[in-house]
Amino acid sequence: MKHLISPLDLSLQELDHILSLGQNILQHPEQYAHVCDGKKLATLFYEPSTRTRLSFEAAMLNLGGSVLGFSSADSSSASKGESVADTIRVISSYADICAMRHPKEGAPTVAAMHSEIPVINAGDGGHNHPTQTLTDLLTIKTLTGRLDHMTIGMCGDLKFGRTVHSLINAMVRYPGVRFILISPDELRIPDYLRQEVLIDGNIDFIETNELEKYMPELDILYMTRVQRERFFNEEDYIRLKDSFILDAQKMQYAKKDMYVLHPLPRVNEIATEVDKDPRAVYFKQAKFGVYVRMALIMTLLGLDK
């Protein structure tokens, strides 16, 4: 039985298979309307979510399956002190596959150790968000036709941003990928990621706090919000939250075929005027998330043959 806890749980061959399947679903959704007839997805969300939870639910419903679960820890037995291990043992009797989001890093790993059904990590603390990474990869591949030999700018909260950490881990597996890491000094990528993934992997990267300077070099600009929920100090959050704001003026420095991605939700790090720019693809990106989660569910349930 296979789980998805980290993007690295998938080999490049498995990753390419899921992305190709996602592209086929995007083009021919009607062919997949009954693939999961009779199957159930459990969504165990101990942390608030809009896109991830609803896109998982939409994915399963689009495949003909059904959904059960909870949308906050307060509405589950976690509020009574039940452990993740006990919860997943029970849920294994109710559903065929599970998607879990949890504020504590490693919680989905614990669930996978005690589960009798496939577990998908839908985000754990500041650690990993592999299905957002699959969404990002499908978006990049569909719009640019490749996942290699490109320069990716990542801007905003690179310290706590689990989507950033997951995407870096995934993209370093492709040749010729270069990173421009744009953030305040306090929100730079974690030391382990810099050393063990980028430096040890001999990956070309620059850390900077200048967005405009590097805009002309980017093939992809991945914007992220500064996450209030990851800060212990409200003053630090207020001081850093508006460090980088992408607006129409800054977009003038970008290539004509550069794309702006964002895992959403957006707060104010992308001005709404940018939404009209055809290079702004974050809402299309959210739509692609449904297709790639459909492909993942099918793959983990062995229904992708």
Image (tube, rainbow, N blue to C red):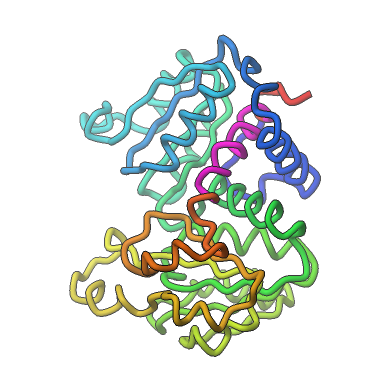
Q: Percent x, y for residue 249?
A: 45, 81
Q: Looking at the image, is 77 positioned above or below residue 36?
A: below
Left or right for 165, reference 200? left
Q: Depth check: 217 or 11 in front?
A: 217
**On screen, residue 102 above or below 86:** below
Q: Residue at x 51, y 22 (%)?
A: 61
For the C terminus, give its image quadrant. Answer: top right
The image shows residue 256 at horizontal and vertical percentages of 64, 73
Q: Is residue 45 left or right of residue 208?
A: left
Q: Which segment is the magenta one?
A: 285-299
Q: Quadrant of residue 220?
A: bottom right
- The one of 62 and 154 positioned closer to us in this rendering: 62
Q: Position of residue 177 (x, y in %)?
A: 72, 71
In the image, farthest residue toward the top: 38
Q: Find out whether residue 295 is within the magenta segment.
A: yes
Q: Which residue is at a point 59% across and 21% down the rendered structure image?
A: 63
Magenta residue check for 107 = no
Quadrant containing the N terminus in the rendered view:
top right
- Count the labels in the image: 0
171 or 242, nearer to the observer: 242
Is residue 1 at all visible to an observer of this figure?
A: no
- Measured as percent of width and height from the top left, residue 143 is found at 68, 56
Overall secondary structure of the magenta section: helix
Q: Can residue 186 be seen in this snapshot?
A: yes
* Residue drawn at point x = 71 percent, y = 23 percent: 302
Q: Is residue 85 above or below residue 177?
A: above
Q: Tell me which corner region of the image, top left, top right, bottom left or bottom right, holds residue 74.
A: top left
